[in-house]
Image (cartoon, rainbow, N blue to C red):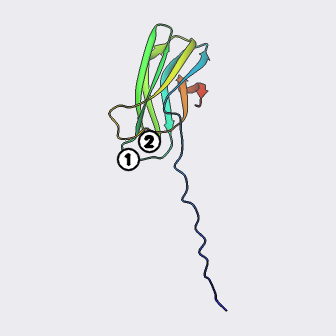
Amino acid sequence: MFVVPWIALAAPPAAPTCDQAAHLSVQVPGGYDAVRVVTAPGRAGAAVVVSVAGGGRWTSLEALAGGPSTLQTVPAPGGPLVVAIEPSLEAPATACVERIELILGGEVVARVAP
């Protein structure tokens, strides 16, 4: 009688997948004075560029992987806005965006997720 040992091999966990680029629409009636980008943990140095356009303004922020990055701005007008997520051309990898928050007076007034 032969005994054949079996080794159960589990597949390694898959790396998180995320959109490399996206354009999202959001309505912000009262405007905003800060943009917060929350990213998932990732490779050291991974980054993403998030831009908010509308009302004659263009605000852009580079966020690193692994937590929140916030940019304070002068108050921007509200209305329809476009939020763009793009890879950072200077980073070794792209960070995964979990959510983007537009803030006015310390309160979140809009939240979008890719």
Residue 45 in percent (x, y) is at 36, 43
Residue 61 in percent (x, y) is at 41, 27
* Residue at the left extreme of this rendering: 90
Identity, as a three-letter code, of the amino acid under mark 1:
Ala
Q: Residue 102 bears which disc, if any?
A: none
Graded by Cα atoms within 10 Å as few (under 14), some (14 to 19) or many (20 or more), the crowding at tag 1 reads few
Where's the N terminus, which quadrant? Answer: bottom right
| 8 with respect to 37 (left or right) | right
Q: Is residue 107 above or below residue 4?
A: above
Circle 1 SS class:
loop
Q: Residue 65 bears which disc, if any?
A: 2
Q: Quadrant of residue 57?
A: top left
Q: Is residue 109 above or below residue 45?
A: above
Residue drawn at (60%, 19%) of the image = 26
Circle 2 SS class:
loop
Q: Between residue 88 and residue 98, name the one nearer to us.
A: 88
Q: Residue 44 bears which disc, if any?
A: 1
